[in-house]
């Protein structure tokens, strides 16, 4: 029998708030790439996806709209979970960066707990 190496990656998944279908798994998201750390990147409002790491089902949706803009719905139950915009290049609140094109609305999805704990400091 061969041993199978299991990668103990932290659990990173985003689920539809309504039907609990997993929408995203193991992707990098919510990168705070504004130097001012302004409110636009607040995970309590939006979860942004890296443009280079968009999962296939979202890409398919974007291609349907010819890389313009539209809404993202859960592919299982149709609940609105976010949107994308490749047209306007909306800037973040403080104006130093252009917001990523694809985002989930935090209140419409179930996000992993680790996103809420990213500022936690462990004292010993
Ligand atoms: Zn759903
Ligand atoms: Zn900013």
Image (cartoon, helix red, strand yellow):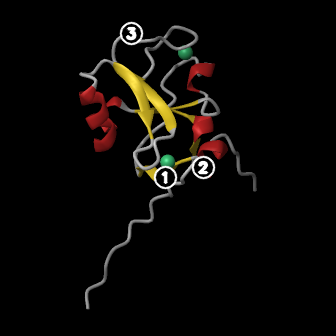
Q: Specify whether tag 3 is near ligand 2 (CB below 8 Å).
A: no
Q: Which residue is mark 1?
A: 12
Residue 111 picture location, percent across and down: 57, 46
Q: Are marks 3 and 2 in contact (CB under 8 Å)?
A: no
Residue at mark 3 to residue at mark 1: CA–CA distance: 29 Å
Q: Which residue is mark 2?
A: 114
Q: Residue at x 75, y 52 (%)?
A: 123
Q: Disc 2 on helix, strand or loop? A: helix
Mark sitting earlier along the chain (3/2): 3
Identify whether 94 is placed above or below 38: above
**Relative side of 40 to 7, left or right:** right
Question: How many circles with numbers are drawn on the protein?
Answer: 3
The outermost residue toward the bottom is 1
**Relative side of 32 to 87, left or right:** right
Mark sitting earlier along the chain (1/2): 1
31 and 43: which is toward the camera:
43
The C terminus, quarter of image: bottom right
The outermost residue toward the right is 124
Q: Are marks 1 and 2 in contact (CB under 8 Å)?
A: yes
Mark sitting earlier along the chain (3/1): 1
Closer to the camera: disc 3 or disc 1?
A: 3
Q: Residue at x 32, y 38 (%)?
A: 53
**Is residue 30 at least partly visible in the picture?**
no
Residue 76's label in the rendered image is none
Q: Which residue is mark 3?
A: 88
């Amino acid at each position: 029998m061969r041993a199978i190496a299991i990668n103990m990656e932290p659990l990173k998944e985003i689920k539809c708030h309504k039907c609990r279908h997993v929408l995203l798994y193991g992707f990098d998201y919510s990168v705070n790439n504004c130097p001012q750390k302004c409110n636009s990147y607040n995970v309590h409002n939006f979860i942004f996806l890296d443009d280079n790491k968009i999962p296939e089902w979202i890409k398919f949706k974007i291609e349907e709209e010819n890389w313009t803009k539209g809404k993202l719905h859960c592919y299982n139950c149709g609940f609105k979970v976010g949107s994308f915009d490749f047209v306007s290049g909306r800037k973040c609140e403080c104006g130093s960066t252009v917001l990523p094109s694809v985002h989930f609305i935090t209140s419409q999805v179930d996000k992993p707990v680790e996103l809420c704990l990213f500022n936690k400091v462990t004292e010993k």
